[in-house]
Image: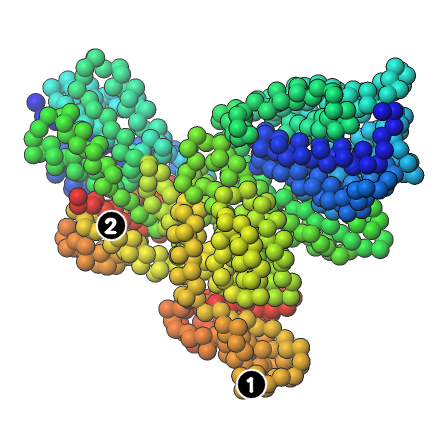
Amino acid sequence: MTIRIVTDSSADLPTDLVQKHQITVLPCYVVVNDQTFKDGIDIQADEFYRRLQSEARTPTTAQPTVADFQAVYRDLVGQGDQVISIHVSGKLSGTLNSAEQAKASLDDGAPVEIIDSQLASISLGLAVLDAAIMVADGGDYREIAAKVRQNLSSHHGLFALDTLEYLQKGGRIGKARAFMGSVLSVKPILRLQDGEAHPVERPRNRERAMRRLVELAQDLAPVRRMAVIYSTDPERMAVLKQALTGLLPADQIIEARFGSTLGTYIGPDALGVAVTQAS
Amino acid sequence: MDQIRGQDLKQAFTVATAYLEEYRDTVNALNVFPVPDGDTGTNMLLTMRSAVQSVTEGCPDGQEHSVARVSSALAQGAFFGAKGNSGVILSQFFKGFSDALAGKESLAADDLSLAFKLASNAAYQSVGNPVEGTMLTVIRMASEAVQGSAAQGSNENVLGLWEAAFQASQDALSHTPEQLPVLREAGVVDAGGLGIVVLIGGALQSLAPLVDISALSRFQRAANGSATGLIAPGFLESTLEQDWGNCTQFIISGPDLDLDAVRTRFQETALSTVVVGDGHNIRVHIHVENTGPALAYAESQGALSDIKIENMDYQNQLFASRHQANPAKGAALALLPVTLGAGLAHLFRESGCAAVIQGGQTMNPSVQQILDAVHSTGANDIIVLPNNANVILAAEQAAASEPCIHVVPTKSIPQGVAALLVFNPEESWEENVDAMTAALAEVASVEVTRAVRDANINGVSVTEGQFIGLLEGQMVTAAETPEIALRIALDQAGLSAEAIVTIYHGAGTPISDAESVAASLNHDFPGIQVDLIDGGQPNYQYLASVE
């Protein structure tokens, strides 16, 4: 009997890590110009960002369906596995609802633990990775799930956006609304906190935004695990990564890309840092 | 009592205002129309306070005063102190009331009938599109009850008529949710309507102390004067997605104003329009997305004063956040900058400031104006940005009088913008003041204006009409064009390819002139970031910052 980790594509986990840790990733859906795609399967990031900026209608996203979850859970439970299913914050998406409903349709006592990560993007990815590594070390799946929940507050996400336009168009502006404005060109920095994106500050250009991202990450030291992420500009992510090597050696910093689900809201030219604090 | 004397009337509305004071929070908490921003009670109260102050000064105690004089003083005070839609409507109630009593020594039953009738008519006329189920309906029903009783001759007693008005106003208030869908949806009676009921009831209590007005208290359901939670759950959240625009208020003064033309103009171009006044003073209350054209039109008609512009999206959010069971930390923190010029006011408002206090170098706001603006935000803590060395003192005096006011001593608009950009409404005021104060050191402030006289300052000789460039308030150059003065002052501020230069061009300075300066900077410092912003400020051709 094995313990299997399930997440969704909003975790933005790079494929090599998904394969290495045998993580099951349910794709979210993204609707571009009335065509529905599975995030990361039917549509890749390059094409998505090109269309994000060229289509007249803003893309929309949809959570994996109850049926998607049922298929995965039935499959795994049917072969005798136990499941820890870790997903994007319930305040940002309905994915957890799909998961919960799918679990409810299974036999009573089916070994499925569902976790609201209160996170999104690669900071969710780091929480998932943590869980996968715990599983490899062995233990009871319920105990591992409890530990994952306990550790959630050590994961942090910091994002520097080029514009809040996509967040607003997508209806996810939330608390970042305080940073709306069009007169001054600013590159808003947001932080994941209590399952939502909160405003941090408004640097005047990308260089300063990157500098602030680094400083804010440094404030979280000591660091146990770290990732950098970009939407359209890998070179700037490389610069960001280099600036963070004081916290962790470069070969230990994970590189990721915002997939089409996150990209719908975060937009082009965005950067992010995810940090797992050492306790 | 078969006649109400002037001093009785004065006492009646003084007591009524005290009652409104008590009901203010309840009225605020009910406020869902036209914009759910929780300020109706406060606006009505501020209007009544101004009315009472005017009658206190104009009709001193210990003397006989005619009802004509008392009602006219009330109307005048209400007019000049009117705040918000509800306040303006209230001021017109008093205007009509006072018109009916012109020349009257005291007030008998038939006078009261006419007074309520004209008061109701005036209230309706002040509004662009009267909506039923609001305070207008409550006023009209009260008025009709008074006239009905008086016409039947069944009630020669003036106090009996007043009591009839009170009863009818309560009935009308109870029925407002049937008339206005938004009230039904929110599960409340009309806020302004309750304000009217409280005023009529409070006045009645003063005129006839034996009458029982305790029925009023059924409208004050929540305990401890804190009435949060009166609005149906979910209603306020549903309002947050709407764009409410800017609540814009001002007085136009001039020798020969056309009230009807001004009213028509704003009815056609704005929402929630209330335009009242006469040939000399017109008070305008409108809701518009863009305040610029409205103010420009008003300015073409006469002199503007008492300008108040509030971001209703912000107020709506603040109100909604306070209705949540656990308001987010720091949700009730507001930023209040002092600035002049439509562009700068827009910049500050759209970037999350609660309101903007009009003022600057040539127009320093008074301590009272700052306090009024502070109160209009309804926030628990307010950070004031004076944005001018001459305004810091007034801001600090305001802060000394109320512990909720904090000042980041910004000496210029560029410093104010630097402070604005590190403002985080989710942090405490202490953390914000620290971060904002620290940010001031990161920015150099440049100003360009025209010399008004010959002078020799800091070793620079200036002749009248030349343009002078100031760096951190100190004159550093005098030149023949504002662009040359700007460029020299910027150079002295220290430029590099990594710098961010922000140039705010003033009213009357074409953007093409500002672009020429930007081009020269780009040429000399390839890679430099130059942002041009239409500040619209008077007196200064340019304001600029180097970061």
| Residue B526 visible in image | yes
Drawn side of residue B293 relative to residue A211, left or right: right
The image shows residue B190 at horizontal and vertical percentages of 64, 27
Which residue ends up furthest to the top in the rendered image?
A107
Q: Looking at the image, which residue is at 33% across and 45% down?
A: A191
Residues marked 2 and 1 touching at CB (< 8 Å): no
B516 versus B143 height, above or below: below
In the depicted view, which residue is nearer to us: B492 or B158? Answer: B158
B18 versus B290 height, above or below: above
On the image, numbered disc 2 is attached to which residue?
Answer: A220
On the image, numbered disc 1 is attached to which residue?
Answer: B460
The picture quadrant where one finds residue A78 is top left
Chain under disc 2:
A
Disc 2 and disc 1 on one polypeptide chain: no
In the depicted view, which residue is nearer to us: B527 or A275? Answer: A275
Drawn side of residue B314 relative to residue A223, left or right: right
The image shows residue B199 at horizontal and vertical percentages of 71, 30
In the depicted view, which residue is nearer to us: A270 or A113? Answer: A113
B178 versus B295 height, above or below: above
Chain under disc 1:
B
Drawn side of residue B255 relative to residue B528, left or right: right
| Image quadrant occupied by the C terminus of chain B | bottom left
Helix, strand or loop under label 1: strand
Mark 2 closeness class: few <14, some 14–19, many ≥20 residues within 10 Å: some
Q: Looking at the image, which residue is at 54% across and 62% down?
A: B392
| Residue B31 visible in image | no
CA gap, disc 2 and disc 1:
51 Å
